[in-house]
Structure formats: C-alpha cells, structure tokens
Amino acid sequence: MTQPHPFYAAHEATLQRALTAIAERTYWSAYPESPSPKVYGETAAADGEAAFRAYLGADFPLDQPGTTDRVATESSPFGVALDVRYPHVTDLDALITAARAGMRAWRDAGPQTRAGVCAEILDRLHRNVFELAGAVQFTTGQAFVMAFQAGGPHALDRALEALAYAYAEQVRTPASAAWEKPAGRGEPLRMTKTFHVAPRGVALVIGCNTFPTWNSYPGLFASLATGNAVVVKPHPRAVLPLAITVRYAREALADAGFDPNLVTLAAEAPDERLASVLATRPEVRIIDFTGSTAYGDWLEANARQAAVFTEKAGVNTVIIDSTDDFVGMCRNLGFSLTLYSGQMCTTPQNILVPAGGIETDQGPKSFDEVAGGIADAVRKLTADPARGVELTGAIVNDGVLRRLEAAGGVGDVVLAAQEVKHPSFESAVVRTPTIVALGADAAETYGEEWFGPVSFVIATGSTDESIRIFRRVVGDKGALTASVYSRDEAVLDAVEEAAVEVGVHLSTNLTGGVFVNQSAAFSDFHASGANPAANAALTDGAYVASRFRIIQSRR
Amino acid sequence: MTQPHPFYAAHEATLQRALTAIAERTYWSAYPESPSPKVYGETAAADGEAAFRAYLGADFPLDQPGTTDRVATESSPFGVALDVRYPHVTDLDALITAARAGMRAWRDAGPQTRAGVCAEILDRLHRNVFELAGAVQFTTGQAFVMAFQAGGPHALDRALEALAYAYAEQVRTPASAAWEKPAGRGEPLRMTKTFHVAPRGVALVIGCNTFPTWNSYPGLFASLATGNAVVVKPHPRAVLPLAITVRYAREALADAGFDPNLVTLAAEAPDERLASVLATRPEVRIIDFTGSTAYGDWLEANARQAAVFTEKAGVNTVIIDSTDDFVGMCRNLGFSLTLYSGQMCTTPQNILVPAGGIETDQGPKSFDEVAGGIADAVRKLTADPARGVELTGAIVNDGVLRRLEAAGGVGDVVLAAQEVKHPSFESAVVRTPTIVALGADAAETYGEEWFGPVSFVIATGSTDESIRIFRRVVGDKGALTASVYSRDEAVLDAVEEAAVEVGVHLSTNLTGGVFVNQSAAFSDFHASGANPAANAALTDGAYVASRFRIIQSRR
C-alpha cells in the first residue's frame, strides 16, 4: 500500500476534528462565518469581489472534454449583467468517457488520499470564499452576508461533514485482514483477505437555483471521497458558484497528480434537459438532486440504475400553542420569514394558531394579535429599504413573483408584500413577505408548498387540531423543518411525538438567535429522509454508505 | 432515559465482541458449528429431532391476528411427510395493524434494549438449534450437517453480524447533545438537541426455498434492531424454519414486555401472491428478498415506497489459468460442485479453462484432463451413496430437475448426473452433479444461471479470453462468487482487477478446506451490491443505515 498523498497529512487534523464533531454533534465549525476583515484580512473582500467581477462577460476558465461552443444562461436577481460564458457540453459520450478515465487511479489511491485531496479542494474554495460569495449573491439574489455565510463557510462545513462521514464509512472495514480458523487438531485454515473500496461509477450532482453550493456540496464531496467521478450539472440560472467550485476542484486534483476530469461541469443551453439525459445514462450510478417534487419523483422513478438522493418541496409548519416570550417569538418568526424573502427550503409556511387565541407572558392574545405580531416583526425588519434588502435579498425568479401575486387572493391579507427599490442595484427585483390568514378548512391552499415570501397563519379549533393538521400535511407533503411554541410540557411532548412519527426535525420555543430555517453543520441534520420532502438526510451514515461497495479478495 | 432491559446486560459481552469482529473482520464465531455432543450435550440432537418431529402433522403453535384457517404447503425433498399447518393470513389489514401496534414502545425502548432482545432471540434459537436444523434439513433437502451449520450457527452468526452493524449505526449519533455557539461578546447560543432513532415502518422479509434462515436472518434482525416491525413471508416450501424463528422471536419479545406482533409469520396458500400484495402496501417500508432475478427486479421496480434489498441470480465463475496443486484444485472444486448438489447461490457454474490446457505441478494438463480431474473429484465424493448423500442432500424442487435434464443436451457431457437411492429416505430425490463442456462461443448457454447441480467447463482461447468472458458475463448477469487458479502473479492481479471492476468477491487458489461457495460471517462479505446478482451486501453499513432515520428535536 502506497503512502497517502501529502494533502492527507496537511488536512488530517481538520478531518479528525470533523470525525469527533459528527460523533458528538455539539457545536463546531471549520470555516469562520464572519466576513469581517479581522478574520479574513483587510483586502480579502475587495480581492474576492474583483476576482468575481473578472469572470463577468468572459469565457469561464475551464477546459473540459466534450464541449465545443459556450453558453451563458444566467440572469441576476439584482439586475447585474453576468454574461459568463461556460463550456457547453455537446458530446456527452466524450464527457463521460473523460470522467471515467481517472477513476481507477482515484480508486486505488485509497480513502486517506481521497480525503486529503477533497479537504484540499475545500481549503482552496475557502481561500477564495469572497469570490464564491459574490457568485452566490448575484446568481441567487441572496444578500451579501447570507451569500457569504450560506454559500461559503456553511456550505464548506457541510461538505467537510459529508467528507468525514464518507471517510469513516470507508475505513470502518479494514483494508486487509488475516483470517485464521481453528480446525480441530489439524492446521488452522488461513486466508489473507483484502477489502477494496470500489466506487459506484459516475456521480451526478444537480444543483438548484437558490443554494447552488450549500445543497450541492454534501453530495459532491461524499461521492468524490468514495472514489466516484462527479459531473456537476448546475441550475442554468446559478452556474457560476459551481463553475468556480469545479475549477478549484480540478486544480487540486491535478496538483495531486489525478485526472482533473474526475470533476466536471455540465453546463447546458436552455431547454436541453441535460439533467434528464445524464441521469438516465447507464454510467451514472449516483445522483444528488435538490429541487421540485415533480422532478425529484421523476428521477427516483426513472434513474433506476442509480442511487438517487433527492431533496424536494415540503410544507414547513409552525404550531403556536402559547409562549412565555411573545415579543421574542414574533421577532424570531418574523426574521425567519424575512430572511432571503422566504426563499429557503426551510422557511416556515404554515403557522397554526388556535382561532380562540393563545396565552402569553403579556396575557391572552387573540388570533389576530398573534398574526399581527408576526406581521409587525416583518414590517420592522423591512421598514428601512437599505437595511431590509440586506435581509431579503432579491427575488430569485418569476415563479416566486407569480406565487406572491396569487397569494393575495387566497385569504385575508395580514401583511401585503411591498415592492422595494434596492438602494444599490436599481434593477433588482425585491419584495417583502406577505402573510395571509386562512381557516383550517383551506387545506387545498395551505396543503401545498408556496415557495417564496408567502406564509399562512391558519386558524385552528385548538392546538389538538393544529397537531392533526401538522401530521396530515407533513405526512402527505413532507417538510424540512417544523417548530412549536408552547409553555405546556404535555403539548411540547405531543408535538415532538408527532414530529418523530411524521419524520420531521422539530425546533422548540425559538425566541432568540437560533432560527428554524437555519441548521448547523456537524450538529443539526438537514432533512430526515423520513417524509416526502427528502429521501435522505444531509449528512449521515445512510447518506454516504451506498456510494461505494466493498469488493473482497481472499487468498 | 430509561435503563436498557436486562437482556441487554445479558448479551452485552457478545454484542461487544461482535462489534470488534466487524471492525477487524478476522476469524470469529459466536455459535459453535460442530453438532457434536461434546459441544451441545449428549441429548441435544435427539431432543431437537423430537421437537422438530412434534411439529409434523400438527397445527404450528402461533397465535397471530389476521389469520383464520390453516395452510400446509411444504413437501420435503427427502419425501418425508411434513403437513405442518400454519396460521393462514387472510386479513392483511389486521396483520399490519397488529404489526404496527407495538412499534412506538419498541422505538422508545432504544438501541440497547432492542439489541438485547434481538440477541436473546438468537440465544433462544441457538438453544433450539437442533430443532431448527431438522426444519431446515427437511424443507430444503440439505444434508443434516449442512442444515445444522448453514441453517443454525452460520445463520445465527450472520444475524448477530447484522445486529452489530445495526446497533453501531444507531449509536454513532448520540442520543442527545448540548450545543453552544459562541456569539461574540454576548451570551453564547445554547440548544439541547435530542436525536431520535425512528424506524421506517413495517419490514417485510421474503424467504427462499434453499436457505430459509441464513438468507432471511440478516434482514430480519437488521430491521427489528432498528425499531421496525417485521413480517416474515416464508417460501411456501420452506415455512417451518421461519415459523420456528418467529415463534421464539415472539416469545422473547413478550418476555421482555413488548408486543409479540412485532414479528409475525405470513404464511400463504399456493398462488396467493402474498409477497407481492405485502410488498406494495404503503405501510411496508423495507423489503429483504432472496430469489429469482425476475421477481427481485419486479420488487425493485414496484415496491417504490420501500427500501428494497435483493439477492438474485448470478453466474458464478472460476478462471483456471495454472496451478501448483492440481489434485487440491480438482478436489476443492469438486467439493464445491457437490455440496448440496450445487443448489447454493454461491456454487460455481462456469469454469473457464484455456482450450490449449494449463501448466500444473504435474506438468501440462490438457483441457480434457482439467475437466476430467474435476469430474473425478465429484465422482469420488459421490461414489458411495451413503457418504454422497451426506454432501449432496436432496433436490429441492422440480425446476432443478428440469434444468439438470436440459443440461445434458447443450454440450459434451463430461460427467453425467446420477440418480441415487438415499439409504435412509426412500422417496428422497437425489442427484449427483453434471459437468458439461462448452466452447467459448456458447455464451447463450453459459451466460445464464443454471441453478442446481449443473456446471460448465468452457474452452477459451486463452486466460485473457477467460478474463474477458468473466467480465462480460458477470458484468451483465452478476455473480455472488468468483475464483481463480493461477501461479502467475500478473494473472492473479489482472483477475483481481477485473473482479473489483465488475464488483464480485474473488477467492484465489483455493485448494484446501476453504471453499468458494462458503463465506464466513464477521469476515467475508456475502454479495457486494456492485453487480446484478444483488443490490446490497450482507452485511455492512449500507445494509443497515437506511433501515431507520434520525429525527432531531432541539429546544
């Protein structure tokens, strides 16, 4: 067995710390989330922005097989011209052949070397995190700080978490074993056994529009670390963050002596349906996808040759029963609804409140007062456009705008969406959230996902009915998050039991600086795989274990 | 958190030893494989046989919901009348409702208690292992020693191995964690996180005719240990071994204070297609199946609501290039072909030999001499019917007889199958193996599985061509085992590389007491999940990790 590549030694301490973190699941982070110059240096932000701007209106520096002309498909929610021209995949056979060419050497390099190279890729992305943040900001419409955090350090943390699980899973079986079975009075039976980690094949990562790095990194690094080649198919409106990712991945692979084509970008022209074509290629054996339920279901049904990991739509739900901190509750929920204009797969949509109102530290509050309290919190956060846009960012695409418009007609508008003029980007499409009150009988409306800045405050007969609605809607449609506010332990226990049964992660009485739509890598699981919103969790043993196989040889 | 049930303490040392074994994968066994009175006591064999015989011609003692009348569907390959009458499942809703009723208490009991109860079930089965062996022998046609070993200790070892993986997977995430995130100069953010192990739902185990316990136990115990209820659907011709299993499982569950309906038997009348009906029930979320490729593929395509683990047909292949021990090679292969009349999913079928012959310790041997040497070894083992039947056992069903008959017409018969009169069971259906020589161009014949005592010695142009055929046939049709004989390291390496690429476990130069068709629990993996013969391996992390989900609650 050859020695691991020096990249392994360079990143071994980080990897070991990550292994401890996933075993403890207490707080840890490898990549600082503050974009402050004190952390990253005085020139880091400006240098990163310049690097980002240098990509605009130019050919993106990627030299890949299977591509001929160039495509530019992005359109910034901030109205900034991007016009980055990516290599256009026109010869899939050539792309896949190239992806596979380096797999044997990558496989034979072993788990340590692969982990080292993957950690080196993360390190290089981290060194260029402001460049990455700019790319995330201007393709997704996230405000800068969020684009930096969710698109940079948080995404890198999730990637490292997936890498740690993938590494642990591979080394739990020894590379070899000496087997000696007693045979009565005779000589024992002896065999030398070798356990090869064999990749599944080519892995396909299908990126999404809103979180191109955060949602793609776990699958990308879990597949790469387990020996597979990875083809990254970005969302046509959010290519740049993944193009930058692929660029640095290829450089690190090449520097370590491996074929850079182990990681490739599959950019497409509009309407080419490249994801579907790739997903059903026999060489593609793993698929990671984040996006619509319809397409996720299609992948699960049609990409039968592959292990398919999907994160789809869901109906995130809040149950409000009572609270000891009415102001904190409203502020916390208001922030969750406002952040990135509710365009997170984890943003609450349905807020279930008894029609008769609730008990609070400020005395009884009527249904309208609860709805109004949350609406006021949103108003406060968005009243000043200059501050508001730093939370809301911009609207990612027209589908969100259409839903926002439709929402005004389905119930009583508690809070109307406002069109906001962005102080820095005059063509930016900015909207504040809307909140609509519905009755419990409006299940046709609130029983579907309204992705974007649309939430419903739903008047139920009682908290018991709220729990029944929660069970039914999440059971049928799934959810990535759920939360409950109550000062009654019995209610908290009942909701926790319901959450476990319908398979959704639950947050309880969030009134401070932790928000239901944010999850912490190395501690919180994202999705569960136990309800229709996702068929797997990021990131656990089940997420990585079937990305490779053990092939045994005994002599 | 409540204390684990005392069954955990009772079996903790065994479980810990099993956890060590799966991490080392050196030799270990928990259940002695010798049926000797020195190991099991003077009266164990007779007592067990009596217990087995007491089941015959009687109502099997199982009291389950959803059943009304009784069914008897078994017919012994040894010609012994069985006529055991099992509860007939006629009300699936009632059965599934009953299976689910105890799941919450079982879930809340936690991984330790579940592991303890599962280990107790194994212990009780082991205490009744001779009874189990009789049931396996007379339903499968295995000779007694094999029925005892493969149906008893080896099956129990595999079950314990699966249990160990399942336990390890659940406890790798802590039950709870205190999360504290620094927040600049302010108070840190603090959350208490609880990680619930939540089962998938009802698990279905579909047993096979030939190895009712060995092939069913890993899935049964992996699912049960992770909190699922298990419905055991036995093969209609091999019900008794699983009925006995279910009986003792239910007793142990009840003794530990759990609902015995967490494990139920789903016996059916002929042609009820109960497996298909159960497999597509929405409550059924895990399926383990061993059997035909056609039915395994059907399950994978149609039981889309479930995680489906299948072991299907394959074409096990031997590459003979050269040998330092011609006699040992022929003897070893002859034994593998003779054992249980080749009715193992791991028995070699295709033996690839260069037409120009091979180099051996006895000088060059022609193709015919190699084929003849293996045939002689089989002849030697089967010449004396009394000794022969202790290896071959009986033919499990008519399908095997039909293939055996057909095999005589597809090539040059090197060794003809013989009808043997069993010295103890006059109606037993016993046949010795046939060996047929084919050319490399007969891929239509050798490219399919001929389950039973049929093997082909195939004349190839060279070892290189043998490797190409191996790659092609195993790549297309899959295999559970492969082996190679060569004294050339380059050939061994080339075959090992081919084996890793097509995803089949390889044995090299077996000439002694280890046989390609036998795998050792805790050391060898059975199947790989990397070729068409199976979509999973018994038993590794991937086999257990998706049988449950982690649902998180944070306060």
Image (tube, coloured by chain):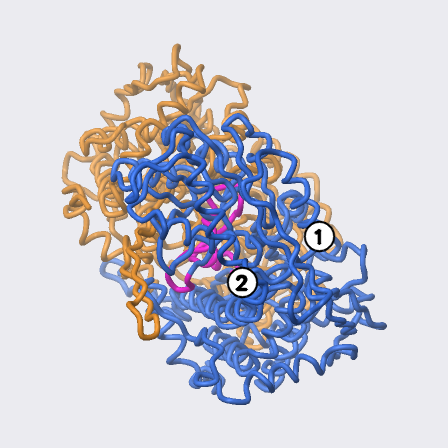
Chain colours: A orange, B blue
Q: Mark 1: which amino acid?
A: Thr
Magenta residues span B520-548
Q: What SS does tag 1 mark? A: loop
Asked whether residue A209 is in view, the answer is no
B23 inside magenta stretch = no
Q: Which is more toward the observer, B163 or B234?
A: B234
Q: Height in image: A341 above or below A424? A: below
Mark found first going from the N terminus, 2 or 1: 1
Kindly identify which chain the residue marked by label 1 belongs to.
Answer: B
Q: Horizontal placement of B75 versus B514: left or right? A: right
Residue drawn at (61%, 56%) of the image: B287
**In this view, which residue lies farthest toward the right?**
B69
| Quadrant assignment, res B189 | bottom left
Inter-mark Cα distance, 2 to 1 = 39 Å
Question: Where is residue B255 shown, x and y percent of the image?
Answer: 60, 87
Task: Tell me, for residue B133, which label it has, or none.
Answer: none
For disc 1, the marked residue is B280
For disc 2, the marked residue is B391
Q: Mark 2: which amino acid?
A: Leu
